[in-house]
Image: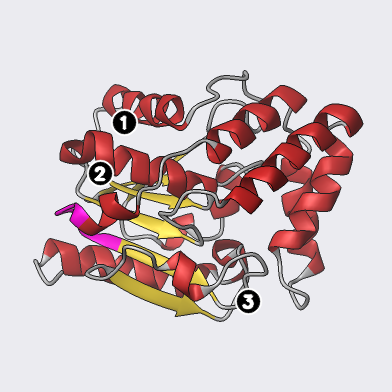
Amino acid sequence: MKELVLIHGLCGSPKYFERMEPLLNAEVHALTLPGHAGTEVGPETMDQFADWVIEEIRLRNLEKPFVLGHSFGGYVTTNLVRRYGEELSGFGLLHSTAASDTEEAKEKRNGAINKVIEEGVKPFIDGMIPNVFSDDSDPTLIQQAIEIGYEMSVEGIVNAQRAIRDREDEVGTVLATELPGLFIYGEKDPNMDETRAFLGADRHKKAVVSYSHMGMMEAPEEEAEIVNQWMQEVEHGKV
């Protein structure tokens, strides 16, 4: 059976994938990134987060797994493609982008870092999480994501925000790689447009779903079907 690694987003956990995971035609390994879901605070650079993930892959004796990352997890994934691509079978960006932060986005990251240091985790999460859903998203899912976010520490949020802010642009990476890629974009994503989501995806599989940045929570059946079809196409050499 195919092996599939899932990497959650900022202030998330494997619970983001809990409804989607049973629908995936693979042996799934949903990782908890350091500093998230009550774990010990760890890296503060994207290279270090990617190094941690590749070590997990090796410790679990996974043989060239597929790796899919949501949002921040997608940034980790593109770093893996550039630095450890020979150890993967394919990669996917779920509601993410291969591009680096714009200068405006970096300033927002700095503001977010200051906010969490000054006000603490709960006010930060209360402000952040609802803004990644759409206006018509299910309130129970929003509350679930908020509760997951509350498991963060101030240091964990600060380190992850710094890693995101200072990450390299990986558009050239996904353009140049020989690995097959999958890009999923939610058309109700309040913080990203389709153009940015699909930067570098020219020869990769692209899919648009009618949900928010949190599509894997809102539409697990639809997103699992997209992932399963893509993995099958890769196996059969169709992509």
Residue pointed to by mark 3: 188
Q: Position of residue 204 (x, y in %)?
A: 26, 67
Which tag is nearer the camera, tag 2 or tag 3? Answer: 3
Residue 7 in sight here: no
Residue holding disc 1: 57
User: Mark 3 or mark 1: which is in front?
Assistant: 3
Q: Is residue 39 left or right of residue 79?
A: right
Residue at (77%, 51%) from the top-left corner?
128
Q: Which sits in the foreground, 167 or 19?
A: 167
Residue 116 lies in what quarter of the image?
A: top right
- Residue at left 53%, top 67%? 220
Q: Callout 2, which amino acid?
A: Pro
Question: Label 1 sits on what residue type?
Answer: Ile
Per the rendered image, the range of residues in magenta is 176-181
Disc 1, SS: helix
Q: Residue at x 54, y 63 (%)?
A: 216
Q: Check whether the beta carbons of the residues at disc 2 and disc 1 lie within 8 A of each other.
A: yes
Q: Is residue 164 magenta?
A: no
Determine the CA span between mark 2 and mark 1.
Answer: 8 Å
**Local crowd at mark 3 within 10 Å, few (<14), some, or many (≥20)?**
many
Residue underneath mark 2: 65
Relative to 62, does residue 97 appear above or below in the rendering? below
Of helix, strand and loop, which one carries label 3? loop
Q: How is colour applied across the structure in the image?
A: secondary structure
Query: Would you call the spot at circle 2 few (<14 residues within 10 Å), some (14-19), or many (20 or more)?
Result: many
